Image (cartoon, helix red, strand yellow):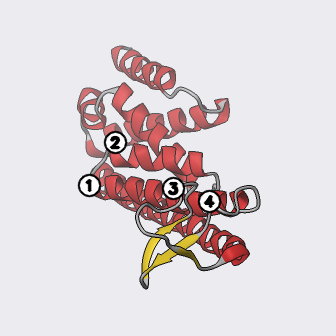
């Protein structure tokens, strides 16, 4: 009886900390952990307290499941906000996650900046474009002419297809890289989880 109440208390705490998931997702996780606790106790002859200690606090385990669900959803998304949110969560787990997050910020910033300046070129044709001074890039995509001696705006209205193409490709590449990194992270986490459960 005491064993059953220990398991029920742990599972109740886990359910409460799983947070913003569908009822079906929460119950599936609770069933999986319940089966794992009972199987480990029966097969290994370990006490329920030992199995629960190996699993760690219910709150921490729920956090791992929430992170996993967020990363799984983001790895199929094309929304920059969802992807950056998942990359930020991944950044809390290590240096590689930090690199993915900053790669996403940089890629979306550059790509979005080019697309934005392409859209602004018809409105501010004199102040938006690509300027060359003495054969060297002086400025591009800015609303302010480059300081110093006069510079020559080289692309004119061709800046629009150039910036739209380059910006769109940068956004797509950034999305691809973040999604790929999230999928790899998910596989690694799954392998680590299997190893820890089997040990």
User: In terms of secondary structure, where does tag 4 sit?
Assistant: loop
Label 4: how many Cα within 10 Å (few below 14, some 14–19, many 20+): some
Where residue 66 sits: x, y (%)?
48, 37
Q: Earlier in the sequence, mark 3 or mark 1?
A: 1
Can residue 27 be seen by looking at this rendering?
yes
Q: Is residue 16 left or right of residue 93?
A: right
Q: Earlier in the sequence, mark 1 or mark 2?
A: 2
Q: CA distance from mark 4 to mark 3?
A: 20 Å
Q: Identify the residue at image location x=34%, y=42%.
A: 40
Q: Tell which of 80 and 51 is nearer to you.
A: 80
Q: Earlier in the sequence, mark 1 or mark 4?
A: 1
Q: Earlier in the sequence, mark 4 or mark 2?
A: 2
| Residue highlighted by disc 1 | 95
Q: CA distance from mark 1 to mark 2?
A: 33 Å
- Which quadrant is home to the N terminus? top left
Q: CA distance from mark 3 to mark 1?
A: 21 Å
Q: Which dot marks residue 127?
A: 4
* 114 relative to 27, above or below: below
Q: Dividing the picture into quarters, in which one does residue 56 lie?
A: top left
| Residue highlighted by disc 2 | 40
Q: Identify the residue at image location x=47%, y=19%.
A: 12
Foreground tag (4 vs 3): 4
Label 2: how many Cα within 10 Å (few below 14, some 14–19, many 20+): some
């Amino acid at each position: 009886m005491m064993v059953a109440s220990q398991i029920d208390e742990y599972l109740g705490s886990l359910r409460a900390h799983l947070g913003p998931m569908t009822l079906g997702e929460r119950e599936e996780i609770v069933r999986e952990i319940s089966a794992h606790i009972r199987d480990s106790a029966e097969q290994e002859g370990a006490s329920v307290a030992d199995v629960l200690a190996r699993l760690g606090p219910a709150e921490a385990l729920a956090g791992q499941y929430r992170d996993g669900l967020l990363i799984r959803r983001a790895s199929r998304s094309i929304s920059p906000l969802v992807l950056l949110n998942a990359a930020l969560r991944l950044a809390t787990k290590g240096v590689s996650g930090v690199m993915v997050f900053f790669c996403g910020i940089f890629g979306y910033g550059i790509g979005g900046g080019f697309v934005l300046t392409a859209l602004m070129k018809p409105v501010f044709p004199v102040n938006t474009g690509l300027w060359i001074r003495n054969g060297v890039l002086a400025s591009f995509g800015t609303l302010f002419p480059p300081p110093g001696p006069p510079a020559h705006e080289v692309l004119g209205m061709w800046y629009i297809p150039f910036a739209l193409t380059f910006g769109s490709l940068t956004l797509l590449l950034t999305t691809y890289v973040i999604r790929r990194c999230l999928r790899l992270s998910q596989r690694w986490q799954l392998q680590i989880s299997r190893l820890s459960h089997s040990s």
